Image (tube, helix red, strand yellow):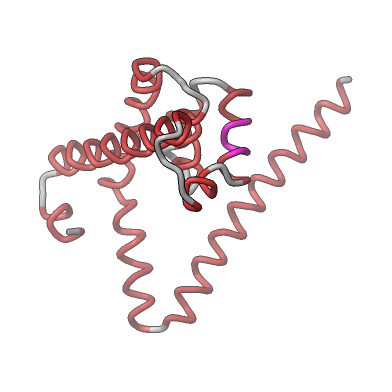
Amino acid sequence: MVDWIRSQPFIVACLFLTCVAGVRSQCTYWLGRAVRAGLVRSAWAKRIASQAALRARDKLERWGWPMIPVSFLTVGLQTAVNLSAGLIGWRWPKYTLAAVPGWIMWGVVYAAGGLALFAGIAAIWAAAPWLAVATVQTLVVLVVAAVYITRRRRVLAAAATG
């Protein structure tokens, strides 16, 4: 599949990946709505209301609609935010309008190089699985450090002014 996408002209790859993001986010949103309505009753449905989904719901309620398109630039938070939008009962038109810019960003990012990142990690895994794990762990540590430093600076700046 990755080879097929990379063999397409850039605009075709962007459009295809934008549609993939749209279908995936709509399915996740409607799953959240089904759980909210009580249509899905299982142990799996209980896990949907997990700590990650609850944190995403809190962020969504705190930051509002901008959180939805921004979530498409993350891995993991995207699903939790889309699911939470359904769980808290956001109206479908409002959710979809907020999500469309995220779909487009996701399509462009993955067409421009996001897929190359995953293909590179897969190639490293094939050659040396321990190196792939170390690479992913390093990327995670760098992202966590960047978030921590940014938040720390924000807290220090708020303390200095207030």
Left or right: residue 111 compared with residue 9: right
Residue 54 visible at all: yes
The residue drawn where x is 45% and y is 74% is: 132
The residue drawn where x is 32% and y is 74% is: 123
Q: Is residue 62 above or below residue 77?
A: above
Write down the region rendered in magenta: 54-58
* Count of residue discs: 0
| Frontmost residue, 135 versus 71 | 71
The residue drawn where x is 69% and y is 40% is: 150
Q: Quadrant of residue 160?
A: top right
Q: Is residue 133 above or below residue 143?
A: below
Q: Is residue 35 above or below residue 131?
A: above
Question: Where in the figure is residue 162, as x and y percent of width and height?
Answer: 89, 20
Magenta run includes residue 57: yes
Magenta run includes residue 10: no
Left or right: residue 78 compared with residue 109: right
Question: Where in the figure is residue 55, as x and y percent of width and height?
Answer: 62, 38
Left or right: residue 150 compared with residue 22: right
Left or right: residue 39 compared with residue 141: left
Q: Is residue 69 above or below residue 141?
A: above
Q: Main secondary structure of the magenta part?
A: helix
Question: Where in the figure is residue 145, as x and y percent of width and height?
Answer: 67, 53
Q: Quadrant of residue 69?
A: top left
The residue drawn where x is 45% and y is 36% is: 35
Instruction: Point out the image quarter for the N terminus.
Output: bottom left
